[in-house]
Image (cartoon, coloured by chain):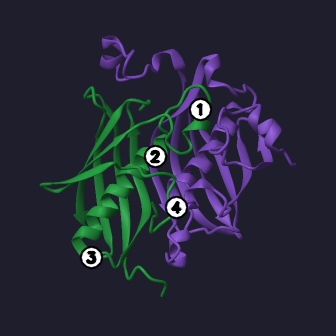
Chain colours: A green, B purple
């Protein structure tokens, strides 16, 4: 298994297209990378990993839309409201809406509604992605 | 001031491989803190980067950079009331983030400096802000970060989650 970018973990198991974006799922397991230290004896999916789930899902959506030869970067975390924790056994579903910035073709805004298997909202995430042409070094 | 891993681990519960603060270089409890983190290619985030990936693929993942800054924020929030083991009953959780801007990527070999200030502290909730610098240049700006100390007994896993806890959303 190799990646085209550094990442703390594979933060999505599956992505499915939706009407205005993409829906990603991730099953939280205690053996996920980094969880041994967050926290010993009581693994909790770090809040920033929910941000990474949304980022990886949105990245795939942008690459599917604009082709694989774009470089997608996280430019800003506009807001995150954490509402409930994710523990091993939980399945995170992130429903992501993507909207191109009408004034800047290199910006994409992502709004994600994140829920776990029991239906409880876990987070509301708004990110801004920067999309550059060319995956290779300029 | 030069405070290392021992005091850091006596203060916050994060442990290898997600203890992402290496050293504290200034702390004014209740006010501000500066901490260092060295980015290295030996971190797990780089384990699976493809052999033919471009140099840009080695940008340190932004969520880990935010986590590292946030750990500096937790250090400041609990500096005088350490909480090194969540099994003792309490855990600091991120409640909300507003407006984090990423100015530039950092790569293995970089030393970054986190600067954290307490904007407001009310009971078990702290509002913090700050930035991360690399070579004197800002790479991350954090405008509003809310941390709340929570009782761990409220955080049940999916098998033991009570209806009450589900309704409360914890």
The residue that disc 1 covers is: A39
For marks 2 and 3, give the CA distance. 25 Å
Q: Do the residues labelled 2 and 1 touch (CB within 8 Å)?
A: no
For marks 4 and 3, give the CA distance. 22 Å
Depth-wise, is mark 2 or mark 4 nearer the camera? Answer: 4
Q: Residue furthest left?
A: A19
* Disc 2 element: helix
First of labels 2, 3 by sequence position: 2
Chain ID, mark 4: B
Q: Looking at the image, is A61 positioned above or below residue B167?
A: below
For marks 2 and 1, give the CA distance. 14 Å
Instruction: State the image coordinates of residue B25 (x, y, percent, origin top left).
Output: 81, 50
Instruction: State the image coordinates of residue B103 (x, y, percent, origin top left).
Output: 53, 68
Asked whether B52 or A87 is in front, the reply is B52
Q: Residue at x 53, y 31 (%)?
A: A43
Q: How crowded is mark 3: few (under 14 residues within 10 Å), some or many (20 or more)?
A: few
Instruction: State the image coordinates of residue B27 (x, y, percent, origin top left).
Output: 78, 43
The residue that disc 4 covers is: B48
């Amino acid at each position: 298994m190799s990646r085209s970018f550094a990442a703390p973990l594979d933060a999505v198991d599956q992505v499915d297209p939706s009407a205005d974006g993409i829906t990603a799922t991730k099953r939280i397991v205690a053996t996920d990378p980094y969880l041994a230290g967050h926290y010993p004896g009581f693994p909790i999916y770090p809040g920033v990993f929910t941000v990474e789930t949304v980022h990886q899902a949105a990245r795939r959506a942008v690459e599917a839309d604009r082709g694989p030869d774009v470089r997608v970067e996280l430019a800003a975390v506009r807001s995150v409201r954490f509402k409930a924790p994710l523990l091993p056994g939980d399945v995170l579903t992130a429903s992501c809406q993507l909207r191109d910035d009408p004034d800047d073709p290199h910006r994409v805004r992502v709004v994600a509604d994140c829920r776990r298997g029991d239906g409880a909202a876990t987070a509301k995430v708004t990110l801004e992605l920067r999309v550059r042409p060319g995956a290779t070094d300029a | 001031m030069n405070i290392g891993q021992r005091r850091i681990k006596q203060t916050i519960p994060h442990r290898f491989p997600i203890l992402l603060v290496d050293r504290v270089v200034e702390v004014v409890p209740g006010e501000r803190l500066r901490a260092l983190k060295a980015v290295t290619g030996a971190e797990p985030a780089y384990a699976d980067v493809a052999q033919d990936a471009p140099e840009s693929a080695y940008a340190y993942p932004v969520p880990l950079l935010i986590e590292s800054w946030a750990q500096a924020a937790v250090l400041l929030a609990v500096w005088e009331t350490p909480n090194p083991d969540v099994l003792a009953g309490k855990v600091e959780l991120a409640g909300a983030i507003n407006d984090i801007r990423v100015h530039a990527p950092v790569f293995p070999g970089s030393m970054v400096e986190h600067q954290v200030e307490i904007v407001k502290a009310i009971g078990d909730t702290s509002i913090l802000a700050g930035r991360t610098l690399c070579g004197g240049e800002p790479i991350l700006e954090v405008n509003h970060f809310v941390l709340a100390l929570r009782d761990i007994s409220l955080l049940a896993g999916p098998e033991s989650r009570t209806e009450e806890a589900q309704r409360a959303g914890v």
